[in-house]
Image (tube, rainbow, N blue to C red):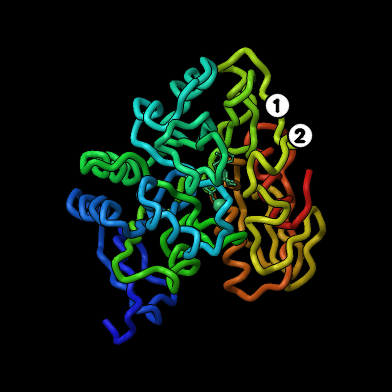
Amino acid sequence: MGTRRRRVSVIRSRSKPVKWDDLRMEFISKCTADTISNAAQALKDGHLVVFPTETVYGLGADATNEKAVSRIYSVKGRPSDHPLIVHISSINKLEDWATDIPDYAIKLAREFLPGPMTLILPRTDLAKNYITGGQNNVGLRVPAQRIALALLKKFEELGGQGVAAPSANRFGAVSPTTAEAVGEELGEYLDSADLVLDGGQSVVGIESTIIDCTGLVPTILRPGAITEEMLQQTIDEKAENSKVQSKVKAPGLLESHYAPKAKISLNTIAEPGEGFIALAKIKTPIGAIRLASPSSLEQYAKDLYMALRSADQQGLKKISALIPEGQGLATAIRDRLLRASNKRE
Ligand code: TXA
Ligand code: MG
């Protein structure tokens, strides 16, 4: 340990640190029942705990502790009117936070939770303005990730009711899908009593599908791995697309988001020295630097943010990404790439 006061404990299960030595962080080698208990207690005590989920890493705080939640905003550098998703351990806890839950939302919850889906529902009194950004609804999610679920269960055993967690990146930047990426994003903003739980690379790799369940039909506000096609199979109504939704419904869904420092151009031929992202079947243009060669859409989603980050680490000025065509998960990948390149579909 060095002399700097700022020190973050990282409970990790794999790989070596990236340039974190400068931050004098403490590393704890793996997540056990004990370390997860300590992390749950840290949340109860008002500290921040970054935890892995199947989508991306979340920057967690006790969702009923206003002071702890306010630290999320300062650590992220995020405007305080942007609502936060509350993470719970089971759909049995939905009614603590939400009321007037429509039948279709119950169907979706039973089918897809735990999983990469967030439901926006009318709130109960438990969801205060500092969670919902003053809106009358609240975003709820049960993540499908072993460490996340164990943490949430333990937190609830200690009397906690839910963990507010945005993606663990600085506002507008690329969401982290590894603990190393969390360190790069937030290392210098976290305090010595905060924790980072390392669960390896997130398997989905892009943020949850957000579904507004406050109307007669579900409305996708952010596409993700639970696709429109999957939703339609589960319910009879047609899910409407996010384009027609106003930003008032999801103030965090800005035009430019998930953006690396490198400039992204879509569907152009990469020049020598530029980064290149495309499905594996597409050859790398001469002189371009291959950042990802996913062989499926699932792999594309999983590796996308790592690829964007790696471009910045290599100091590349430009990335050319070939966006995947079609429906399903391709829709979510396109959405993220378009926002990262500051364009919209
Ligand atoms: O996969 C995920 O959803 C990750 C992991 C950590 O769970 N979380 C995440 O949170 O992506 P965040 O805050 O980075 O993005 C959540 C988005 C924001 O754009 C926010 O505005 C929107 O969800 N949101 C949250 N609560 C909302 C609400 N009550 N109404 C409308 N939009 C909401
Ligand atoms: Mg985010």
Q: Quadrant of residue 12?
A: bottom left
Q: Quadrant of the C terminus?
A: top right
Question: Which secondary structure lies at badge 1?
Answer: loop
Q: Position of residue 139 (x, y in %)?
A: 51, 37
Report whether 236 appears left or right of 68. Answer: right
Q: Amino acid at mark 1?
A: Glu
Image disc number at residue 37 = none
- Callout 2: 10 Å neighbours few (<14), some, many (20+)? few
Q: Position of residue 281 (x, y in %)?
A: 68, 48
Instruction: Give the residue at mark 2.
Output: 244
Q: Quadrant of residue 71?
A: bottom left
Mark 1–mark 2 contact, CB under 8 Å? yes
Residue at image coords 29%, 46%: 151
Q: Amino acid at mark 2?
A: Val
Residue 260 shows in the view: yes
Q: Position of residue 336 (x, y in %)?
A: 66, 49
Q: Quadrant of the N terminus?
A: bottom left
In front of the other: 136 or 30: 136
Instruction: Give the residue at mark 1.
Output: 240
Q: Position of residue 291 (x, y in %)?
A: 62, 61
